[in-house]
Amino acid sequence: MSTDLIDANVSPTGQFDILSKYEINRLSNESRGSQYQTFRNCSLAVLNSGGNMDDGKELLETYSNFDISVVPTERSIKLQLKSAPASAFVDGKIINGIAEHLFAVLRDIIYVNSEITGSPLHDLTSSQGITDAVFHIMRNAGTFDRVRGPRLVVCWGGHSILSEEYDYTKQVGYELALRHLDICTGCGPGAMKGPMKGATIGHAKQRDRHGQYLGITEPGIIAAEAPNAIVNQLVILPDIEKRLEAFVRAGHGIVVFPGGAGTAEEIIYLLGILLHEENKDQPFPVIFTGPSGATEYFVRIDEFIASTLGKEARSRYQIIIDNPQEVARQMAAGIHEVKSYRKEIGDAYYFNWKLKVTSEFQQPFSPTHESMLNLALHKNQEPYLLAANLRRAFSGVVSGNVKDEGIRMVEKHGPYELRGDPGIMHSIDVMLESFVNQQRMKLPGKEYIPCYKVLSK
């Protein structure tokens, strides 16, 4: 066996400590059922935490012999690993945090398949049914605390960022934690790890021993953005749309750091929701921030939003450059408004039921060459609907960049083609080209070959 691989049995953590015979047999059987490949791939991604790899296809090919099985025991289960990355172990024993993440994969992938996706109790064709499914998945993961007040800051940003940008995300996380705020990210490296790392110091200084470091991901992206070691709660939603909804339902404010197409997708998703008439009066603090060297990045983002979604969209966020303390002060003030609003209307602190998320932002989008070409990228529609289609366009670019399925599709059929109004297509082209020039599409050191072509009608 290669020295960088290891076989091991992993004992359960948390809710898997005590199981009934029925639960043991069901987990054992369903783990080898229709969801096995997803369960295996997500488990491999977790085991590769900290690895310098952002390519789902590359990860699966590198560890093609990896296997994971649920082994029944008298009182519970164990996970049997074969040809697993040795970096997940210390002196032959698996790292505790990685073990927790492994069982989170088992919980979310198998639970969602048996209790959500395959259950007639959840109507995943309706908007409310999808929101209910997101709620159940988050609650089952133990992320809700009925006593805890609003304090969860969602931090978005790229996995491929400059060292000065990474250091800046740590400073912001530190300042947020000093104000007793928690961190939620996409759980990967770069701008997803930095705020959590900084927050650990801030929480420690405040003797806040109950800091929440929530990581939210989905099966298609987890291989490219493996959960970092600081995440103490990991939740895997079934697809990118439910992942995005989980962010905006669970979070009380959002900080956006520099990133690439994935960050653009998140920004447009959020603004599209906030542009809906029913959300116009709801407080939701949104701050774009980075060090002075990231000024050009936010200029491009701001210009893109102005040229596509208009002035109202620009009014829903503020840009603060090179000032972590001001970011934290403004976010704390914004979350205080959120608390007052939720208290006044009687909405839960832990899940934003009042926020209107329409089906255009909820229904899963499969980025095929045909669906990408047929996106309605024009201004002859409500701004929030244009935002929904722009979000899908960026989602396709992310898929072609880092997701196993998307990479293979582009290799087979060539780049995705985007077609629409000349003004919108020019704005998309300029912004994506700036991401390429700033090396925000892939980790540095790798040649980036665009997975897309921008065409005008």
Image (cartoon, helix red, strand yellow):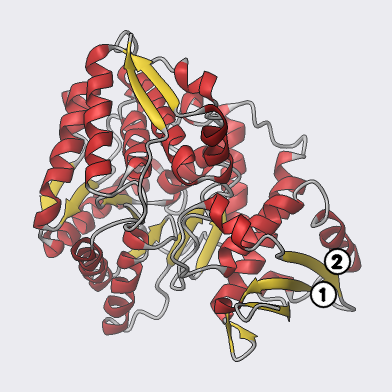
Q: Residues within 10 Å of mark 1 (few under 14, many from 20)?
A: some
**Lower sequence index among marks 1 and 2:** 2
Q: Residue at x 18, y 23 (%)?
A: 307
In the image, 199: left or right of 367?
left
Does the image show residue 10? no
Residue 239 spot, x, y in % from top left: 57, 41
Q: Residue at x 71, y 76 (%)?
A: 12
Work out whether 33 lies above or below 310: below
Q: CA distance from mark 1 to mark 2?
A: 6 Å
In the image, 92: left or right of 424?
right
For the C terminus, the quadrant is: top left
Identify residue type, mark 1: Ser
Residue 298 spot, x, y in % from top left: 16, 43
Q: Which residue is mark 1?
A: 76
Q: Kindly state the secondary structure of the residue where label 1 is placed.
A: loop
Work out whether 400 lies above or below 383: below
Q: Kindly state the secondary structure of the residue where label 2 is placed.
A: helix
Q: Which residue is mark 2?
A: 24
Q: Are marks 1 and 2 in contact (CB under 8 Å)?
A: yes
Does the image show residue 400? yes
Quarter of the figure with residue 187: bottom left
Residue 156 has which mark? Answer: none
Residue 20 spot, x, y in % from top left: 86, 68
Residue 376 spot, x, y in % from top left: 41, 14
In the image, 284: left or right of 52?
left
Of 249 and 201, nearer the camera is 201
